[in-house]
Amino acid sequence: DVLSSDIIILTITRCIAILYIYFQFQNLRQLGSKYILGIAGLFTIFSSFVFSTVVIHFLDKELTGLNEALPFFLLLIDLSKASALAKFALSSNSQDEVRVNIARGMAILGPTFTLDALVECLVIGVGTMSGVRQLEIMCCFGCMSVLANYFAFMTFFPACVSLVLEKGARYLSDTEVISLVNAKHIPAYKLESMMETLERGVAIRRQMLSKKLPESSALQNLPYKNYNYSLVMGACCENVIGYMPIPVGVAGPLILDNKEYQVPMATTEGCLVASTNRGCRAILLGGGARSRILADGMTRGPVVRLPSACDAAEVKTWLDSPEGFKSSPDPPLFGTLFAAPGPSPPIECPHSQRLSMGAPKSQLHGAPTRPHPLSSLIGWLTDFGSQWHRCCVSANQECPGRLRHSWTSLDRDEAQVSN
């Protein structure tokens, strides 16, 4: 009867141990990382080996004794701390950072694990003094199990994690990277810098975004491959998910300040490049153009809602006074302009282009840069080319007065033009 009861107890214990280990690995699997599963498996195997060695060699137990002790060992395995240390290591971007993060994880988890192991040994060790032989044997196995787990976690496990992640977190699968982003271990905006290529970071961000969209295929027609993202990162766009290709035409040649230019223009507006090209041809026939920059600015127009037009006039007077801009480090270049009368006027404030929206603070108070004359001439060329096409319809026809004035400003007193 005693033997049969022992068999029943051991059978139940083994079943519970198997279910316990299964659910622990099932929870780790939900993290989506094969590395965490593999590392936890290595931890379990090594701990089992250490425990088996202790049972067989130090206590002169045969395989039968090991068979009895192993279920209690499995019941005392805690993979949560092992997975926590693995998460610290997986958030690394380089091998040096892996070592630093493992050390940081051990500094955080080590004292807790040491205290837990000490308390467990003291509590389980009480059973070794119960006088009941079977209970004493079980508690002895329990204490050895706790010590084996502690030894494996504090020595073997950190070295194992470092070796497994020798190439860094950038060699994880896309699913594992997404899991780390969702767990806040990797910032989503740093994906490009964390991966081996910038393009892969963009691809992973697209995967994450597609799962949140009502139509998961919405980004299929937005290209992202074969693009030089190094020109974008930290310069002109964040959280990139692709790029929009735009047709690029060329207008020219344009003779400006005795230099010849071919003007590329990216646009989807019909006739824009053709109109600019006609303006370039007109300047070429006239012997070229010389440029001077009189002002360089960009107008902002915030709308202010006021009770009445009289109040708007008072605001206008105040804005034009020195007191209105005494607290501003960068007053408008030419004062302010109310674009329309009334109680809700848009206030136009021309500022230097270096003060454009989103400019870094370090650029706001730096020396203004002189724009290339070519950029200031493109808009004029487009309008000039359109007027030229409308007005010059026959050979040797003289340009109208308004165009002649523009032509004179380009160092020609008169212009006889032909198609």
Image: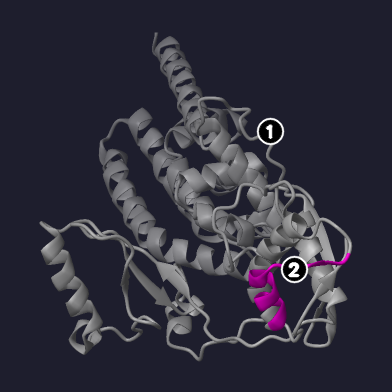
Say whether residue 414 is visible. Answer: yes
Task: Give coordinates of residue 180: x percent, y percent.
Answer: 52, 47
Q: Is residue 252 magenta?
A: no
Say whether residue 265 is visible. Answer: no
Which numbered disc, 2 or 1, marks the residue that appears first in the sequence? 1
Task: Give coordinates of residue 35: x percent, y percent.
Answer: 63, 45
Residue span colored magenta: 396-408
Task: Give coordinates of residue 364: x percent, y percent.
Answer: 44, 82
Which residue is located at x 43 percent, y 16 percent? 12
Which residue is located at x 15 percent, y 60 percent? 309
The residue pinned by badge 1 equals 220
The front one of 170 and 109 is 170
Quick one: quadrant of the N terminus? top left
Q: Residue 134 vs residue 417: left or right?
A: left
Please say if 305 is above or below 412. above
Question: Around disc 1, counting alpha carbons within 10 Å, would you say few (fewer than 14), some (14 to 19), or many (20 or more)?
Answer: few
**Residue 399 — which label?**
2
User: What secondary structure predominates along the stretch shown in magenta?
Assistant: helix
Quick one: quadrant of the C terminus? bottom right
